[in-house]
Structures are given as structure tokens and as C-alpha cells.
């Protein structure tokens, strides 16, 4: 029993000794630093703290699940990262505790016990003759070294003398400071990170609030989802609309959020934003009232970007600004079907963050969700052509065999290589239209028309999810900068009688042109061609309907014309046929436009370049609208803006520790690199010479020059 107990104690001591050796090993610390560096690179490449759905859209379900399991979406708060950081603190602390005492002793030591053999073992040594007695020589050498900035100690005996000098002893302090700095910075990082929050979740019964319950009132949220105001460290966000008060902040996590209670309330009196001439924001500033919840004392303050307010150890930063529930007035226009879009329009009132239920004429119900409002939008506008970087809803599709002429007419926006110019293009509204099955698309519509290719265009944006870019339907604005003429034209295009009247007027206009010598049969053929073109374009033929059913789009547009040409015309003649069809189509739509203007009480349009550009853009928009996936479009008619400030509140007990660590790191690196330790020994020998030896902690050119100078002077 005694022997086995002694063996067990010996094994335990051996294990403890090996553990201390490992933890205090510089290699182990460097390995940990390497792992932390790699993890930090991952945390830099992958955006941290985003909602999980964003990562699913970016990486796909499989890799998103794998990355989430490895906590790569929150690297700096992952348990393994904190564990590695803790081991690094322990390892570097052991290094300092193990080596610092020896270094402190070494700083004070003169090392005057080194014998002749040890001095000759140094690479930098030489002998030189003693000119007088060894005592006088030692005193002269000591004075010379003291003049050069060395601390000198002289040892004189009857038969020999020794001079010992040293300088740069602070080099050893550099090691101590640099390694202590790593410990302080890591400890400060641990304190200022999510360590306390994680600890309360792991051991304190707290839990993250799931996204499905985040719409709850603060008062209704259970306490297990709230952190008390005594939480020693946190970094959270506060959303405060104008005229409202908040006493809680939100800590975001990948799988939800958690409520952080504050020891004070923040009331936003007024939010100010100033802009440059380009429309880019220049200054954010919030006028706030801070009320201490313990004493009731109120403090008025202004918070600007990079100018935080410190209250009770909590720093309040101006982070950003958002919409605080602006009141919106939208006008809804039917985008499909035979209804008169101008007369059938109606007003919808809403508030950002709210929703309302709509029902279409066929009984289908939709939910309109008001998701955002922007009073200013800064876009890249080309100086030369006024194009914006927007991609049209309609897509060019070569697989349908459209002739190049038809492709050139599709209304998709194109990126421009011309120089860009930042310009504020006015307000926009963002909303979602959700069907009965719960599927939703997101829309973004500008209130005012934008100048594209020198023409005012309304941009109606749509995307399937937030991971995609908006695609834009471009509709030309009329002379009154409204949609009325285009909407009336779209309604007439869906009216069979109006289409035939336009065909008749088009044929009559051609027949009445000066110099026209066509026969009645040619007029009849022209009517047939015009009727076929407009019927295909309007999607009123069986061919167009069948073709659209296969493609899953609304029938009509250039796609229907292109498909018909591909099927009915030999390939060698398709280009010529496309040009003829387009000319006929333009003529018929021109007549429809005249009727639309008449219905609106406007005079007939003049046949000039401006009118031709309008009708071409309107025709492209009539084709593109077949790809617009909503029965209604909502245009911003009026608004009452309500601003909101987003503040970041931080409580950082480790901040001063990090600052001290940074100071130590600078001092340590300076001492190690710019204050090399140097020692000199001069010992008298029995042969009448002095032995000069010199050593340094870092061999540099300056050291070599200094040694050569002593060698030259003393010899």
C-alpha cells in the first residue's frame, strides 16, 4: 500500500511538473497565438453576429449548419476561442512568473565572477598592453566606460584588477513589459467580451430570446431573457424613435437576442442629420435626455458620431439612424388586367413597421407590410447619360430566339462604365407583399422619377429575398412627371376594341401619307400585320398565352413577338421581319397613346424626337411589366417622417486594462529593440596585458562599430 501510494504521488508530481513546463513554454504560447490569429482571420472574413437566415442564403443550408456548429458566426465569443484565450493568459503568465525573477536578478547582477577562460570564450575579445600599473589602468578604463554611459564597477587587488561595466539593463524589462502586456490585453478582452453574458447563459439560467418572439412588449418578456443593470460588461444597441423613451438595450446573437436592462432611460428629443451637396450624410446628432432610474436626475446632452456620452460607467455612442415609424400615404395602381389603372387607383395609409390586409378583385388576399422609408437616396448618376446602376425586371433571353433588334429594345437597365456622380434622388418606400401562402417579395419604389438616358423614369424595384439585389421596372414619366399617361396606355392595350381602333387609325394614317401609292390590298395587309403585332404584344392570342404558360410569366410583350417570329419566319429572314414588326408595333402603340392622352384631356402628341423617345421607353415598360410579379404597385404619395436613433451602449471594465497593456507593449518593444543590453569586462593578466571582452543581447552594426572603436583606442 505504501509503495503504491508513493508511486501515485510521484506520478502526480511528475504530471504537475510536466503541465507547468508545457504551460510556461514559449512554444505553447506561440502555438496558441497562431490559433487565435487564424480564428481572427476567419472572424474578419465572415461577417459576425448576423441573423442565421443571412448565412443560409450566403453559404447554403449544409455549410451554414456546419459553420454554425463550429461557432464561426460568432468567433470572438465562441467557447473554444475564450478557452484558448484563457490558456494563453495562463501560459504567458507562467512564462513571466518563471522568467521575471531570474531577469530581475540578472539586471542587478554584475557578473564579476567570470574568469579568464569565460571571457576568452566570448566572440568579441582582445588583449592590449598595460601602459602603467594595473591599478591606474583600471581607473582610466573605468572613467572611459563611465563617460560612454556605462555603469561601472572596479575590483582592484594587489596582483590584478578587474573592471566590469554594463548598460541597457532595461532590455530585460522590455521582455517583462511585453509579456505582461499580452496578459493585460487578453484579460481586458475577456472582461469586455461576452464572457459575463455567456456565463449567465451557461450558469445563471438566462437564455436567448428566439426571433419568433421578438415582437413581444418588453414588459411581457420573461426575466430569463433579461440581463440586469448590474451586468459588469456588455455591448448592446438601443433603438429610440423621436419623442419616445427606452430603458433597455438589445444584445444580438446569431440565434436571437437578449434584453439588457439599463440603470437609466434614454429619451430622444430630436435627431439631426446634415448632408453634403451630393446628398451623403455629413453629421448625425441626437438631442437626448438621460434620466437616472435610481435618483431620478435628468441630464440633457447631445450625442454625435465619435463623441459618446459617458453616464454611470456606460458609454453611449451614436451608431446610426433608422426610420422610427414614419406615416406613409401610398397610391396603389393595378399592374395587370384590363382595369383602367388611373381610375382604379386608390389610397393606402400605413406606418413603417405595420401591415394591412388587401383583397384583389378575384378574392385573393394579400398582406401589405410597410418595411421601410428613406427620405434621401444617394445614387450613382452618370454625368454623360444620367444612367443609374439598376438592373431591369425584364431579362434578356436568347433561348427564346429574339432577334437582336428585339433584344436591344428590352427594358433592362445596364451598368455604365462612364464616371459616376453621387446625387440625392429623393424619397423611396420599401414594402413587402405577402400572399395567402405566406410567400413574400420585397419592393422598393422611388417617389420621384430619376433621369436615365436623359429621360425621367420611375423605378419600381423588386427582389425575391434580402440576399438578392433589386431588379427595376423602368416606366417613363409623362410631361407632368406622373405615371398617368403610361397607365392609361397600359389599360388601352388590354382593351380589344381600343387595339382595333388603333390599328384602323394606323392604317388610315399610312394611307394618307403624301406619296403613298399602295393598293387597297396593301392597306388590308397592313391592318392584318398591325392587328397581329398588337395582339401578340398584348398577350391576347393563344400562341402568346401558351408561350407564357411554358415560361411562367404573363403573356405578351417582346417575348411573344420574338417567339412568333422564330416559329413562323425562316431564320434568314428573321432580322428583316423583326424590324418590320417593330415599326408596325410602334405605329399602333402611337395611336393608342393618342387615345390615352385624349381620355386624360390632353392634346395629341407632336411627332418629334421627344415623343418618339417616350413611346419607345413606354413600349419597353409595357413589355417588362409582364415580368412584374405583383398585381399592384404602390407609389409614395405623401409622408410624415419620424426619425429614430440607434445608440450603442457599452460597459467596458477591461478598457483601462487594455490601455495599460498597450502602453506596456509599446515600452516593452521599444526596450527590447532599441535598448540592447551590453556588458564589458576588462581583466589584467599576468603577462602585462589587459583582456577586454564584450557581449550584447542583440548583435547589431552599432555594437560591432563600438567594439572596433574600443579595439582601436585601447591598442
Image: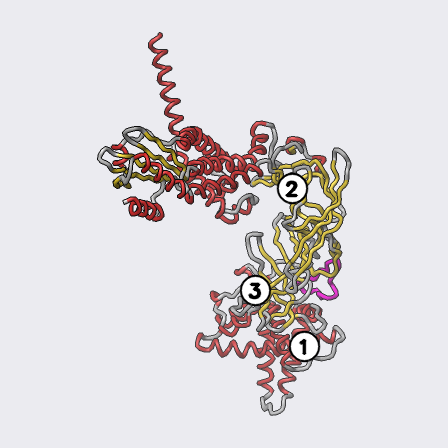
Classify mark 2: helix, strand or loop. Answer: strand
The secondary structure type at the circle numbered 1 is helix
Give the structural element (helix, strand or loop) at label 3.
loop
Q: Residues within 10 Å of mark 3 (few under 14, many from 20)?
A: some
- Which stretch appears magenta? 329-347
Q: Position of residue 93 (x, y in %)?
A: 46, 31
Report which quarter residue 638 is drawn in.
bottom right
Decide which of tag 3 and tag 2 comes sooner along the chain.
Answer: 2
Residue 340 in the magenta stretch? The answer is: yes
What residue is pinned by disc 2?
A: 315
For residue 389, which numbered disc appears in the image? 3
Mark 3–mark 1 Cα distance, whole angstroms, equals 39 Å
Residue at 72%, 52% (x, y): give it. Answer: 271
- Disc 3 to disc 2, how far (Cα)? 40 Å
Residue 495: tell me if it is visible.
Answer: no
Query: Mark 2 vs mark 1: which is more N-terminal?
Result: 2
Q: Position of residue 435 (x, y in %)?
A: 64, 51
Relative to 330, say whether 558 is above or below: below
Residue at 56%, 57% (x, y): give it. Answer: 469
Q: Toward which corner of the image does residue 624 lie, by quadrant?
A: bottom right
Q: Is residue 386 left or right of residue 152?
A: right
Q: Is residue 528 left or right of residue 158?
A: right
Q: Nearer the viewer, residue 245 or 712?
A: 712
Amino acid at each position: 500500500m505504501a509503495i503504491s501510494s508513493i508511486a501515485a504521488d510521484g506520478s502526480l508530481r511528475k504530471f504537475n511538473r510536466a503541465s507547468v513546463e508545457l504551460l510556461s513554454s514559449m512554444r505553447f504560447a506561440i502555438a496558441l497565438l497562431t490559433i487565435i490569429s487564424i480564428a481572427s482571420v476567419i472572424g474578419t472574413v465572415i461577417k459576425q453576429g448576423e441573423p442565421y437566415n443571412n448565412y443560409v442564403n450566403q453559404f447554403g443550408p449544409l455549410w451554414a449548419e456546419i459553420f454554425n456548429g463550429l461557432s464561426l458566426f460568432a468567433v470572438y465569443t465562441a467557447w473554444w476561442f475564450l478557452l484558448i484565450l484563457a490558456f494563453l493568459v495562463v501560459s504567458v503568465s507562467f512564462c513571466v512568473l518563471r522568467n521575471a525573477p531570474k531577469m530581475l536578478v540578472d539586471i542587478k547582477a554584475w557578473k564579476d565572477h567570470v574568469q579568464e577562460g569565460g571571457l576568452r570564450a566570448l566572440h568579441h575579445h582582445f588583449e592590449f598592453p598595460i601602459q602603467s600599473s594595473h591599478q591606474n589602468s583600471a581607473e582610466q578604463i573605468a572613467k572611459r566606460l563611465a563617460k560612454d554611459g556605462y555603469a561601472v564597477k572596479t575590483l582592484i587587488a594587489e596582483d590584478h584588477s578587474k573592471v566590469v561595466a554594463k548598460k541597457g539593463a532595461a532590455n530585460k524589462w522590455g521582455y517583462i513589459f511585453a509579456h505582461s502586456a499580452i496578459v493585460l490585453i487578453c484579460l481586458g478582452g475577456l472582461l469586455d467580451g461576452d464572457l459575463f453574458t455567456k456565463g449567465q447563459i451557461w450558469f445563471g439560467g438566462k437564455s436567448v430570446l428566439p426571433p419568433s418572439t421578438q415582437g413581444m412588449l418588453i414588459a411581457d418578456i420573461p426575466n430569463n431573457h433579461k440581463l440586469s443593470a448590474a451586468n459588469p460588461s456588455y455591448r448592446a444597441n438601443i433603438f429610440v424613435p423621436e419623442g419616445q423613451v427606452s430603458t433597455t438595450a438589445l444584445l444580438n446573437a446569431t440565434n436571437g437576442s437578449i434584453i439588457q436592462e439599463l440603470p437609466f432611460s434614454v429619451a430622444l428629443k430630436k435627431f439631426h442629420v446634415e448632408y453634403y451637396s451630393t446628398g451623403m450624410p455629413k453629421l448625425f446628432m441626437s438631442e437626448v435626455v438621460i434620466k437616472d432610474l435610481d435618483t431620478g436626475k435628468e441630464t440633457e446632452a447631445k450625442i454625435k458620431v465619435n463623441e459618446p456620452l459617458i453616464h454611470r460607467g456606460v458609454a453611449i455612442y451614436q451608431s446610426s439612424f433608422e426610420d422610427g415609424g414614419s406615416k406613409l400615404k401610398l397610391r396603389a395602381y393595378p399592374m395587370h388586367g384590363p382595369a383602367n389603372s388611373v381610375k382604379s387607383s386608390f389610397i393606402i395609409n400605413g406606418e413603417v413597421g405595420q401591415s394591412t390586409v388587401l383583397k384583389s378583385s378575384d378574392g385573393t388576399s394579400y398582406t401589405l407590410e410597410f418595411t421601410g422609408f428613406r427620405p434621401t437616396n444617394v445614387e450613382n448618376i452618370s454625368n454623360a447619360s444620367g444612367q443609374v446602376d439598376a438592373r431591369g425586371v425584364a431579362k434578356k433571353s436568347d433561348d427564346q430566339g429574339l432577334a437582336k433588334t428585339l433584344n436591344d429594345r428590352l427594358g433592362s437597365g445596364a451598368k455604365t462604365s462612364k464616371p459616376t456622380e453621387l446625387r440625392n434622388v429623393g424619397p423611396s418606400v420599401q414594402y413587402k407583399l405577402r400572399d395567402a401562402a405566406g410567400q413574400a417579395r420585397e419592393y422598393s419604389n422611388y417617389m420621384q422619377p430619376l433621369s436615365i438616358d436623359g429621360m425621367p423614369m420611375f423605378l419600381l424595384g423588386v427582389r425575391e429575398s434580402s440576399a438578392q439585389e433589386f431588379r427595376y421596372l423602368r416606366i417613363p414619366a409623362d410631361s407632368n412627371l406622373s405615371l398617368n399617361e403610361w397607365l392609361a396606355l397600359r389599360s388601352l392595350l388590354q382593351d380589344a376594341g381600343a387595339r382595333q381602333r388603333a390599328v384602323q387609325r394606323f392604317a388610315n394614317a399610312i394611307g394618307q401619307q403624301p406619296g403613298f401609292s399602295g393598293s387597297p390590298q396593301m392597306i388590308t395587309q397592313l391592318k392584318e400585320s398591325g392587328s397581329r403585332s398588337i395582339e401578340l404584344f398584348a398577350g391576347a392570342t393563344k400562341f402568346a398565352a401558351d408561350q407564357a404558360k411554358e415560361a411562367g410569366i404573363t403573356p405578351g410583350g417582346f417575348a411573344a413577338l420574338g417567339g412568333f417570329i422564330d416559329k413562323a419566319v425562316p431564320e434568314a429572314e428573321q432580322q428583316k421581319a423583326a424590324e418590320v414588326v417593330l415599326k408596325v408595333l410602334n405605329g399602333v402603340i402611337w395611336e393608342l397613346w393618342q387615345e390615352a392622352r385624349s381620355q386624360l384631356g390632353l392634346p395629341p402628341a407632336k411627332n418629334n424626337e421627344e415623343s418618339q423617345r417616350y413611346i419607345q421607353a413606354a413600349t419597353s415598360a409595357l413589355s417588362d411589366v409582364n415580368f412584374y410579379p405583383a398585381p399592384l404597385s404602390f407609389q409614395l404619395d405623401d409622408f410624415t417622417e419620424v426619425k429614430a436613433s440607434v445608440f450603442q451602449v457599452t460597459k467596458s471594465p477591461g478598457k483601462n486594462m487594455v490601455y495599460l497593456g498597450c502602453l506596456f507593449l509599446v515600452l516593452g518593444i521599444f526596450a527590447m529593440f532599441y535598448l540592447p543590453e551590453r556588458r564589458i569586462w576588462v581583466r589584467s593578466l599576468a603577462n602585462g596585458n589587459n583582456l577586454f571582452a564584450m557581449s550584447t543581447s542583440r548583435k547589431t552594426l552599432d555594437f560591432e562599430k563600438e567594439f572596433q572603436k574600443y579595439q582601436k583606442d585601447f591598442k
